[in-house]
Image (cartoon, grey):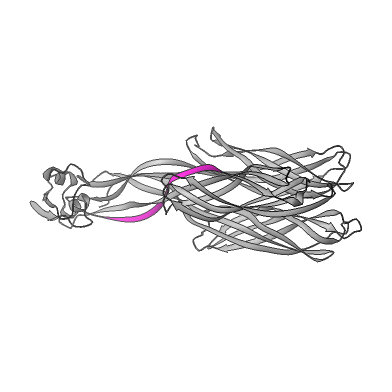
């Protein structure tokens, strides 16, 4: 006979795996006929654009490009600075045995380094190393038993779990567009370098929608017709709506941004402007905190019960935390000699992450590549320095088995040249940490009553507690109940029994 049960269902989530990796992209680029020959590369930079990402069975695949700018000394009599813009395409697969189609993929790509080698005056070799952080999550709809309806005196062992269930997920595509005005004295010749980053991310929830707001910071270094170098920057608002049914302000939202494509279009000399358009894809997953009582074990003192049982993992204690590491330094750079800093590429790298009690210790460095003027704004040079950092981030209830995903953004950045040819450096690294634990939960199903077996009845048993015993295990073994044992032995706290303790186990009289 099958037991009649009342069930509930829940979408449980778990982090299947987290992997860090890197890959190298290498390709040759040809200098267009309208450009002068390359004598020597000065600086190479790039923005990652992702076309496609997917999970295949046992693999993760990503396709995209690095939109690359190479500043170089031209092989001409004047030796002026020029620039080459090219795309470094990539298609990369990572072997991850745990990955299965239908799972969710979080993918974070960042350029660790990008270098240019001149092969001849019309050809260069570009080599980039890209760091990859992969998180794979699985969602499963699970039915669990709340109560058993047709078995008299059934004993249920319930356990309370606080887990994070996925409410829903979605994505949207948006465009950050602006026409950046230049100084009227600047007749634009060509774009030398670009830099884009997403800052000030915020989430607001209302009416089954997630409103995602942020800003795109765009910086452009450019060359004028009279061979002067200048720079301009702007902030472009980003906004997108993502429909997620039943989402509320109490939910936790994970938001990811991906740059898909970049257009930088210099306008004619009369407009004194540069048109910028960045295509951005925004992903959001919303999670709800649930407190559930789930049956972990059961038996009857009167009949023998058989049931199936499986163990699942569910995400719990999910938190999104944020803190700021402020880096302040003074660096002597005599080569500046009163010149102007056009731009600074900032690359923060975590070299070691250690989980301690209620905190994470980060060790790393910030690589800075200064692009500055020489010869009164008609020339350009670069200089790279590294600043080490150590940062403790408080994270209550974190343990060695907690899944941790750390992202860094650049907040404040300020570089001031002082009278002694030093640079006062102020940088705020914004640490964004998403952490969660996986809880092991037993799910019981298919309860059957074995009516042919007879339960042995005892009038009273004397039992001595053994290691690993609990009152539940003892009561189940002898067909009694926890309440009967605690009343007979005057036990005030159910968990308060000691190895070797003598207990009287009464017969169940239901």
Residue occupying the far bottom of the picture: 119
Q: Residue at x 43, y 51 (%)?
A: 356
Residue 38 appears in the rendering: yes
**Residue 492 found in image quarter:** top left
Q: Residue at x 63, y 46 (%)?
A: 329
Residue 210 appears in the rendering: no
Q: Position of residue 16 (x, y in %)?
A: 47, 56
Q: Nearer the viewer, residue 429 or 434?
A: 429
Q: Nearer the viewer, residue 83 or 370?
A: 370
Residue occupying the far top of the picture: 207
Residues rendered magenta in the picture = 305-325
Residue occupying the far front of the picture: 420
Work out which quarter of the rendered image holds the C terminus and state it.
top left
Q: In the figure, is residue 161 to the left or right of 483?
A: right
Q: Is residue 441 above or below residue 239?
A: below
Q: Position of residue 173 (x, y in %)?
A: 65, 44
Q: In the figure, is residue 284 to the left or right of 479?
A: right
**Residue 36 found in image quarter:** bottom right
Residue occupying the far left of the picture: 459
> Dominant secondary structure of the magenta stretch?
strand
Total marks drawn? 0
Q: Residue at x 50, y 47 (%)?
A: 392
Let me know if residue 504 is in the magenta part. Answer: no
Q: Position of residue 351 (x, y in %)?
A: 55, 57
Q: Nearer the viewer, residue 6 or 34?
A: 34
Q: Position of residue 328 (x, y in %)?
A: 61, 44
């Amino acid at each position: 006979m099958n037991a009649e049960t009342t069930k509930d269902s829940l979408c449980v989530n778990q982090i299947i795996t987290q992997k860090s990796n890197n890959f190298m992209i290498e390709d040759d680029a040809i200098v267009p006929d309208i450009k002068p020959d390359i004598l020597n590369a000065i600086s190479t930079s790039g923005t990652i654009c992702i076309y496609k990402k997917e999970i295949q069975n046992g693999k993760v695949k990503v396709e995209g490009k690095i939109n690359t700018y190479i500043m170089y000394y031209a092989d001409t009599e004047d030796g002026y600075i020029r620039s080459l813009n090219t795309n470094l395409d990539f298609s990369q697969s990572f072997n991850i045995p745990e990955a299965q189609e239908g799972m969710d993929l979080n993918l974070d790509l960042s350029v660790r380094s990008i270098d240019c080698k001149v092969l001849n005056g019309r050809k260069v070799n570009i080599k980039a190393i890209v760091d990859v952080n992969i998180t794979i999550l699985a969602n499963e709809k699970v039915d669990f038993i709340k109560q058993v309806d047709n078995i008299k005196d059934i004993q249920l062992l319930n356990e309370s779990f606080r887990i994070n269930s996925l409410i829903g997920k979605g994505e949207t595509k948006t465009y950050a567009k602006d026409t950046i005005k230049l100084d009227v004295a600047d007749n634009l010749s060509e774009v030398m370098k670009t830099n884009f980053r997403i800052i000030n991310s915020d989430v607001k929830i209302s009416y089954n929608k997630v409103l995602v707001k942020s800003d795109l910071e765009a910086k452009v270094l450019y060359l004028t017709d009279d061979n002067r170098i200048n720079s301009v920057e702007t902030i472009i608002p980003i906004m997108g709506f993502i429909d997620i049914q039943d989402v509320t302000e109490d939910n936790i939202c994970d938001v990811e941004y991906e740059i898909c494509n970049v257009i930088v279009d210099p306008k004619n000399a009369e407009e004194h402007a540069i048109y910028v358009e960045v295509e951005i894809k925004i992903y959001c997953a919303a999670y709800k905190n649930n407190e559930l009582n789930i049956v972990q074990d059961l038996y009857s003192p009167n009949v023998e019960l058989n049931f199936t049982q499986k163990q699942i993992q569910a995400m719990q204690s999910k938190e999104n935390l944020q803190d700021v590491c402020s880096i302040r330094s003074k660096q002597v750079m005599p080569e500046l000699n009163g010149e102007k800093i056009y731009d600074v590429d900032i690359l923060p790298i975590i070299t070691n992450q250690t989980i301690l009690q209620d905190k994470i210790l980060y060790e790393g460095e910030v690589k800075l590549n200064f692009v500055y003027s020489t010869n009164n704004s008609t020339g350009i040079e670069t200089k790279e320095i590294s600043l080490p950092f150590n940062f403790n981030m408080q994270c209550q209830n974190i343990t060695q088995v907690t899944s941790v995903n750390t992202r860094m953004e650049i907040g404040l950045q300020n570089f001031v040249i002082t009278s002694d040819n030093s640079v006062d450096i102020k940088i705020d690294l914004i640490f964004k940490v998403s952490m969660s634990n996986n809880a092991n939960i037993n799910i019981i199903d298919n309860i059957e009553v074995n009516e042919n077996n007879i339960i042995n009845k005892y009038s009273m048993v004397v039992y001595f507690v053994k290691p690993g015993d609990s009152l539940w295990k003892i009561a189940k073994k002898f067909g009694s109940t926890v309440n009967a044992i605690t009343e007979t032995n005057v036990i005030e706290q159910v968990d308060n029994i000691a190895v070797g303790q003598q207990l009287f186990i009464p017969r169940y009289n239901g």
